[in-house]
Image (cartoon, rainbow, N blue to C red):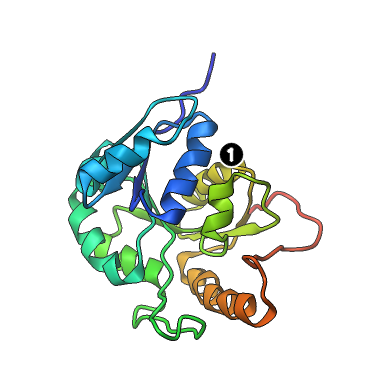
Amino acid sequence: MTEKLPVLAIIGGTGALGSGLATRWAAAGYPVILGSRDPEKASAAAQGISGVVAISGTDNRSAAIAGEIVVVTVPFASHRAILEEIRPAVSGKIVIDTTVPLMPPKVATVQMPPEGSASLAAQRLLGEQVRVVSAFQNVAAHKIQKGEAIDCDVLVAGDDKAARETVIALAAAIGLRGIDAGPLANSVAAEALTSILIGINRRYKVDGAGIRITGRFATTTD
């Protein structure tokens, strides 16, 4: 019997990272709903993605209502407003936050919000009934879009171990290795690292630097 895969709602799904993740998850058989402030734009973007199952597009709140797991892929400038918009729709769900607190023009300089990280800010705003998991910050969006193999690991942080494991499985479904990075407080490391990687890309003319965790891995028990 084929396992029923959860419906993924991607908020900000018409952007580079959102559409790239949607394409890969759809190809892996996950039902995907793209959310956007402009539902017509989301619907048009969904029609341009081919997958094993149908993909649809709608407004952000409707997508969050329909999604069993909600993925937030929006710029930091829109982060709070989008979270406030979808908050009534995500109670009891896993919310994967990919947001990085980039503050132009110095996006290559680490600048963290007062809460410590964007994901910690999301958890505070959404409330403890939502399981926020931080992931996918350190993977170049354009590489996700290309659909090619990516030599990069994904740091996955969250206060709920089962939720972290779910996100690690979602990373594996699109060809990425998810690494359990522990509690949500550790999301500060992945978010800060993004600015460092942007600087590396510029200084060394790298096409989307990423990270790889080395060493021999065993199943975690903590």
Q: Is residue 221 left or right of residue 115?
A: right
Q: Where is residue 96 shown, x and y percent of the image?
A: 42, 53
Q: Circle 1 is placed at which residue position?
A: 173
Callout count: 1
Asked whether 53 or 67 is in front, the reply is 53
Which residue is at 54% across, 74% downward? 189
Indicate the quadrant containing the C terminus: top left, top right, bottom left or bottom right: bottom right
Q: Is residue 33 visible?
A: no
Q: Where is residue 177 shown, x and y percent of the image?
A: 65, 50
Q: Amino acid at mark 1?
A: Ala
Q: Is residue 82 left or right of residue 221?
A: left
Position above or below: 2 against 160: above
Q: Is residue 129 visible?
A: yes
Which residue is at 41% across, 31% downward? 31
Which residue is at 65% across, 83% downward? 203
Asked whether 125 or 40 is in front, the reply is 40
Mark 1, other Cα within 10 Å: few <14 / some 14–19 / many ≥20: some
Q: Is residue 193 left or right of residue 56?
A: right
Mark 1 lies on a secondary structure that is: helix
Q: Where is residue 100 shown, x and y percent of the image?
A: 43, 70
Which residue is at 53% across, 49% downward? 145
